[in-house]
Image: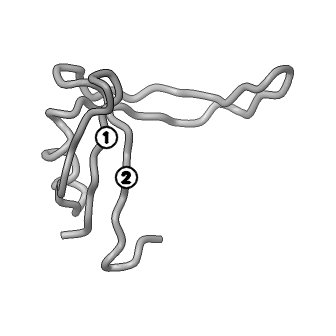
């Protein structure tokens, strides 16, 4: 679902956080979604995980020191 020249912008956990799989759901007032698979990875682990999935880390940065982001592109 990504063009060859497309990029993925992802929010990641801070450095030092382990990669983990869990479940999540969205909630707004009384409305909730079903539970769905969710995964997290730390900023210092995203390059290796991305490579395993056919992507390259192009850039990573933090916003005000507490939100971390990664820009990925297809290999």
Q: Is residue 45 left or right of residue 71?
A: left
Q: In the rendered structure, which disc, 1 or 2, sits on the residue that comes first in sequence?
A: 2
User: Residue at 72% across / 25% down in the picture?
Assistant: 27
Q: Residue furthest bottom?
A: 4
> Which of the 4 image quadrants contains residue 32?
top right
Residue toward you, 39 or 6: 6
Left or right position of 18 against 34 = left
Tell whether label 2 touches label 1 (CB within 8 Å). yes
Q: Which residue does the image show at 21% across and 34% down from the upper left?
A: 43
Rendered location of residue 30, percent (x, y): 86, 21
What x and y, as percent, mark residue 21?
A: 39, 29
As helix, strand or loop, the secondary structure at mark 1 comes to strand
**Is the image coloured rainbow, by chain, by secondary structure, or in one colour?**
one colour
Identify the disc placed on residue 69.
1
Q: Is residue 1 left or right of residue 40?
A: right
Residue 50 or residue 29, whichever sits in front? 29
Give the residue pinned by disc 2: 9
What residue is rendered at 42% in x and 71% in y? 2
Q: Which residue is drawn at the image coordinates 74% and 33% (left, top)?
A: 33
- Kindly report the distance in space between the C-alpha atoms of the residues bearing marks 1 and 2: 7 Å
Q: Which mark is residue 22?
A: none
- The residue carrying pointer 1 sits among few (fewer than 14), some (14 to 19) or many (20 or more) residues within 10 Å by Cα, namely some
């Amino acid at each position: 679902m990504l063009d060859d020249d497309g990029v993925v912008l992802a929010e990641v956990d801070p450095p030092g956080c382990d990669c983990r799989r869990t479940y999540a759901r969205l909630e707004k007032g009384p409305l909730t979604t079903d539970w769905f698979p969710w995964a997290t990875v730390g900023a210092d682990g995203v390059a290796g995980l991305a490579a395993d999935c056919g992507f390259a880390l192009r850039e990573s940065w933090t916003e005000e020191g507490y939100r971390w982001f990664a820009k990925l592109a297809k290999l």
